[in-house]
Amino acid sequence: MKVAQPIEWTAKGVVMLDQRRLPGEVIRHTYVDYRDVAGAIKDMVIRGAPAIGVAAAMGVALGVEHSSAGSLEELRAEFPAICLTIARTRPTAVDLFWAVERMTRRFEQLSSGNSPLDAVRRAMVEEACAIHAEKRATDEAMGRFGAELMPAAGKVMTQCNAGALATAGIGSALGVIRVAVEQGHDLHVLVPETRPYLQGARLTAWELHEGGIPLTLITDNMVGHFMKSGSVDAVVVGADRIAANGDTANKIGTYQIAVLAHEHGVPFYVAAPVSTFDLTISSGEQIPIEERAAEEVTHFRGVRIAPDVTAANPAFDVTPARLISGIICERGVARAPYAESLRRLADSDVAVPQA
Ligand code: MRU
């Protein structure tokens, strides 16, 4: 099945597919400056929690690779600023901070010895590429666990885009759907358009269509209607941050889908890698919610669609754990009570086979 490549490390730099232009145009940019990678994350050239994590790791690696430092000492002095620039891009997806922390740990290991500067630069690039490869393997494993929860035949709803574009693998929520379809499940995907940024209409619809998976695009305000008429057999969404108690932040609109799923007895699953768990916070109340520019609501691609009024634009909402039937990760499926099951999965050292 065809899978989009949102990001790649190449000899020329970090190449990203510009997700702002999809589905109309397929354009790629090459970045050699970590500050431009930070800009690309902030401006949504790349988006989706795990893909942001890969971009963050590659950004840090670029910063190290292209640094003008002439000694390890100088590089050590520059390193925190590189990490800070990458970390200050988007606040909600914890994969971003997970990736920066992992790159920092690797840098500390490498720079505490007497490794030559070039070897440190090379090893940091290798670490970023290893993170990318692991994300692919993670998605495949998540897909296998999640496929078992999908109906043999029926309609599955998702939200936003939790596909290959969002993870740099086969996708989390869409990875589950992909693997289920490959295994012979007869699935039809209901795709809410996901205002205001339209990740559903522009990206999920594009990915599923390219992959030959049947779908119906709906507007966000049709969700209740389709739930009530019995047209939804399961929901599977991705996540940006999962608190220790299972409360889950995902794209704005996810919470209302979860409430409706609960009301209508439809199972509601979250698919996300362990890197999206934030066990340092006890509940979803502590998850920072990004507030994006009001123009994303009042305008579409530069064209005003509302009068000059105040508009709110929280990019994420939090679904309480009690509305979630299961959290699918690369190590299995967590069930309530999540405080125990998430901790067990996070601590288990089950190796994910490389794809
Ligand atoms: O603002 P975005 O497009 O980065 O938001 C993305 C989402 O909310 C996704 O559902 C989430 O990151 C999971 S992606 C596998």
Image: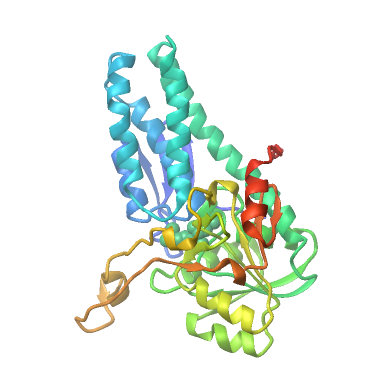
Report the quarter where the N terminus lies. bottom right
* Picture layout, residue 352 above or below residue 6: above
Residue depicted at 41% across the width and 56% down the height: 92
Q: Is residue 195 left or right of residue 171?
A: left
Q: Nearer the viewer, residue 103 or 133?
A: 103
Visible residue check, residue 57: no
Residue depicted at 67% across the width and 47% down the height: 345
Q: How far from the left and from the top, in percent, is residue 288?
A: 38, 58
Q: How far from the left and from the top, in percent, is residue 316?
A: 43, 66
* Picture layout, residue 125 above or below residue 246: above
Q: Nearer the viewer, residue 281 or 127?
A: 281
Residue depicted at 59% across the width and 50% down the height: 273
**How did the renderer colour the structure?**
rainbow
Residue found farthest to the left = 308
Q: How far from the left and from the top, in percent, is residue 311?
A: 27, 77
Q: Is residue 246 left or right of residue 40?
A: right
Q: How far from the left and from the top, in percent, is residue 250?
A: 49, 63
Residue depicted at 62% across the width and 45% down the height: 346
